[in-house]
Structure formats: structure tokens, C-alpha cells
Image (cartoon, helix red, strand yellow):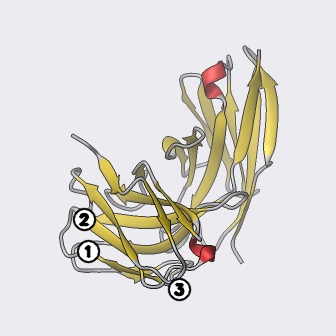
Amino acid sequence: GQNIDQPTEMTATEGAIVQINCTYQTSGFNGLFWYQQHAGEAPTFLSYNVLDGLEEKGRFSSFLSRSKGYSYLLLKELQMKDSASYLCAVSDSNYQLIWGAGTKLIIKP
Amino acid sequence: NAGVTQTPKFRVLKTGQSMTLLCAQDMNHEYMYWYRQDPGMGLRLIHYSVGEGTTAKGEVPDGYNVSRLKKQNFLLGLESAAPSQTSVYFCATQVGDPNEQFFGPGTRLTVL
């Protein structure tokens, strides 16, 4: 079967750094996406990785290791507005997105 | 430029009633998707379309039907609503494979 695993909830402090992990087992791989979803709102795109390595975009970075079936999203200089759920999704062999259940990130002052 | 819109935003149905959710996009994207999101679970694909006049089943299609008569609209129908269909429904569009998806604001549906 296809499976995406990520922690249910994480807590971090404003101004700190947090790493959200995602492991996956899918039939085929055409890239991994990270989305942010604030409570009561729609998911919005953060990043896309298809090759191994680190992609940096401002305060957010995303890493991929295809051989390990592993990715992480790194958030630096945390702000209160970063309190949200972070969704990991993998594009499988049919280009269908398989979604993780999301990691709820709580930022404390 | 509205992006992706969904109608209605909220709805309460009684068991056995039917309804249609409308998704409209002005981005000229070929691909459109209907997902449901339930607490503690990832987004699950109901049906999708890769172009005008085409539809296909996703992971959880039972109890739902769809139509894509016009490129900009994707309709999701519930034939006979059941309490298990209480959920938040999201429509999304995509320009091609693989690519980011753009989501509508969601429809919160409660079936009593």
C-alpha cells in the first residue's frame, strides 16, 4: 500500500528553528510537495522536491532523500503566523498526490 | 482574478437529500480535483478530471458523481447524502504533471 507518515503535532518557540519530518512508501515517485494549511483555510503550496538535496526558499527549506523515502521541512526564525498544519504529499507513478495527515505546528511566544 | 472558488461555503443536509457542489476556476488549468478532508486523515481524492468532458475515480468515489461539461467548472454531486459524508470538501486545480495544486476555500458539509 501507499503510506505517508508525519508527526501529528509539534511545538516550538517563536524565533527558533523546527524540522518537520515526512517518510513515504509509494508506488512510484514523481516528486514531493509541502503545503501549509491554517485552521479553517485551504492548503497553500510551499515547496516541491524531485531530486535529492535541499531547496531553500526564504525562511523555509525542504530536503529530500529518495533512497531513504524521507523528506523534511525546515522552518527558521519562527513567527506566530507559522502556526498551522504542514502537509506532506507525494506524486506517485500515476501523478496522483498521496497526502499525509499533516503536522500541526504550535508556536509559543 | 478569483483563482478557484467553491459554492456553497457551508451546507447542512438531512440523510437522503441530494446536493451539488460547484467549483469554478479562471486560471485555464486542465486538471481539476475534488478532495475530502477529515480530522486525523490526509486529503483523500474523490474524483478528478484531466480536461473538459473527462472524469475519473479517485480513492473514495462511492456515493459521489462528477461532471466537467465546461473547462472552468467541476461539479461534485451527492446522490443520497449519508452522515459518513460529513466533511470539508476542497476543489483543486493543476496546470499539468507534476505541479502544484491550487485549492478553493472549501465547503463544510454536515449530514444529519
Q: Of B8 and A90, which appears nearest the observer?
A: B8
Q: Quadrant of residue A28?
A: bottom right
Disc marking residue B62: 3
Label 2 sits on residue: B73
Horizontal and vertical percent position of residue A17: 75, 23
Q: Of A61 and A67, which appears nearest the observer?
A: A61
Horizontal and vertical percent position of residue B51: 26, 72
The answer for which chain carries disc 2 is B
Identify the mark nearer the N-term, 2 or 3: 3
Identify the mark nearer the N-term, 1 or 2: 1
State if disc 2 and disc 1 touch (CB < 8 Å). Answer: yes
Please identify, in this view, whether the residue under mark 1 or under mark 3 is nearer the observer. Answer: 3
The three-letter amino acid code for the residue at tag 2 is Asn
Q: Are marks 1 and 2 on the same chain?
A: yes
Q: Residue at x 21, y 62 (%)?
A: B72
Q: Quadrant of the C terminus of chain B?
A: bottom right
Q: Residue at x 52, y 74 (%)?
A: B14
State if disc 3 and disc 2 touch (CB < 8 Å). Answer: no
Label 1 sits on residue: B68
The answer for which chain carries disc 3 is B
Q: Secondary structure at mark 3?
A: loop
Residue A95 versus residue A75 in the image, above or below: below
The three-letter amino acid code for the residue at tag 1 is Arg
Q: Residue at x 62, y 38 (%)?
A: A62
Residue B3 versus residue B42 in the image, above or below: above
